[in-house]
Image: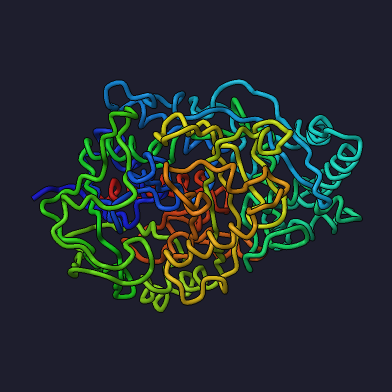
Amino acid sequence: MSDKARVLVLGGGCAGMATAWGLSSTEALRARFEVTVVQAGWRLGGKGATGRSKRHGQRVHEHGLHIWMGFYEKAFRMAKAAYDAWAPPPGCPISTIEQAFSPHYTVSLFDREGRPTHLSLPPRPGKPWDAPGERTVGDGALARWLEREGIGNLTSLLRDLSGTNRSLRTLTRLGKVIVRGLLRDVLAGGSWEALDEWDLCAWLRHHGADSPEVWDAPPIRAFYNLAFAYPDGRAGFGRGALAAGPALRALLRMLFTYRGAPMWKMNAGMGDTIFVPLFEVMRDRGVRFDFFRRVSNLRTDGRSITVIELERQAQLAAEPYAPLVERPELGLRVWPDAPLRDQIVEIAPEDLEGDAPGAVGLETRQAGEDFDAVVLAIPVPAHATVASELIGASDRFRAMVEHHASVATIAAQIWTSQTLEELGWDGPSTISTNAGGLMGSWADMSEVLEHEAWPGDVKTLLYLVDTAPDEWFEGMDRAEAAELVQDKARAAFEGTRHRFPAIDEPALAAAPGTDDKLACQYYRANISTSERYILTPPGSVQYRLAPDESDFSNLWLAGDWTRTSINGGSVEAAVESGLSAAEAIDGKFTRRR
């Protein structure tokens, strides 16, 4: 019998994969831990999962728009380590971290009147995956840095960013309000935590922002949109709820601590660029991946996890399931957009990634027999179902679940036969937000086209995202919800010129013989509990639990819903949480030895 500690990681999104990576990244760790990742459905990635459509020229289908910020040091360094250890297919065009990402410097922010301003941040030394140096990730370090040099830099940077005299005046006034508020509330003997009870716009008004032009200026509204900070799903100026403390810390890190570029775009789907190398490296290092297992219940005796109940969604011809597909025409191994049926004897009829139960069998994992430690890397919106016994046994765990917030998101990917200029956009290739209307945030993601195989002439690829109210989707499954998004997009796009590029049917690219080009694009509604975006409204941070604060002796937590240095939905928060869970598990079992 092995003397390794057996760790079950429940969920294969960014946080779960970071935990498994942290527990398997050295020979010494692999000698101490036997790690298994339990995942519903046929692919890894969580909200970052992607699938290649065989029917549509191996195009990438994403959950939404994923942009990595230049301060995502933990996420980038994990990805870099995976690429360094990976054996890509021969001739793979994305075989290094440098080939996986492209730097991006420009955003386009619309004001209330629908006028865009194009803002560009300058390149900075280094790359976000470089070895760590002096960073300003902790609250104390960030406050010291702000006191030392950030106060003067903030207003000058906002001044340099502005493109018009009007935006110059607005941004300068906004910078002064932020500086004044931070001096009073943080640097003069206060704390960042005191800001957690304030909404960001309300905090700005409290410190002297005297008009919506300032306290709801385009950069502030863009930050609400970046965080999908609309608990009721209705985006727009004057709406939303976002805790000021996490927002301001993230804003300062975005502006002043990035390396190379402020934003980085993936040159193919996030599944291809991130989760393929992570999966293959960890698989080759001995991490086990149990696909087609949906967690249905965590049982507890009040002190620890005793049993994990699973729905087995498929009977496989043989274990383990091999989830990737070779695409020689692309030089890539990719995640398909559906299970590989040649490996499956029987499969559940329900949506494998949704909330509706569906199983061909049941499994249980027993404490002491199958696991010694459990990592709950399933997002908190699902805990009311899968962790109801934990909620009943722990006041802190119950408070965390009761005080969390999340929102449904919608997305569209639009392939066009026209350039951005031909579509009516007179600005640069950009990431844009605040546009208003349906899917008022969008990005030019045309670099992905190089790694797709669409037939015909495709010149531009746009990704569009937004929040949506829950009542839109009441009683619907995810397929029906996606059809509703398509219908709403059709009404918004056809025959109109929105503030983003014109998206009407003649401009669209589609497979030969397609009669309905709008229907041939990709639409998605993220409404299941594991797909909803995690929010940070005022007053919620105090209820978050750190990865090692589950209140159960053999349970650790991992996800952007836990307490981190960010306390908000993001890849970096998820990776930070997962790595922290791995470190805490290693510390506990090392002490035991």
Which residue is nearer to you in this view: 552 or 346?
346
Task: Tell me: 371 left or right of 553.
Answer: left
Whether residue 584 is visible to the viewer of this picture, yes or no, is: no
Give the left or right position of residue 471, taking residue 350 as reference.
right
Q: How many marks?
A: 0
Q: Could one spot residue 360 in this view of the protein? A: yes
Q: In which quarter of the view is residue 30 placed?
A: top left
Q: Residue at x 56, y 63 (%)?
A: 407
Q: Left or right of 165: which side holds 109?
A: left
Residue 410 percent location from the top left of the image: 54, 57
Residue placed furthest toward the bottom: 392
Q: Locate residue 175, reporting x and y percent.
A: 83, 41
- Residue 97 lies in what quarter of the image? top left
Report the front residue among 97 and 547.
97
Q: Position of residue 310 (x, y in %)?
A: 25, 67
Image point 30% across, 70% down: which residue?
296
Left or right, 552 with reference to 468: left
Rendered image coloring scheme:
rainbow
Q: Position of residue 247 (x, y in %)?
A: 67, 51
- With respect to residue 293, does 327 lie above or below? above
Q: Residue at x 18, y 59 (%)?
A: 370
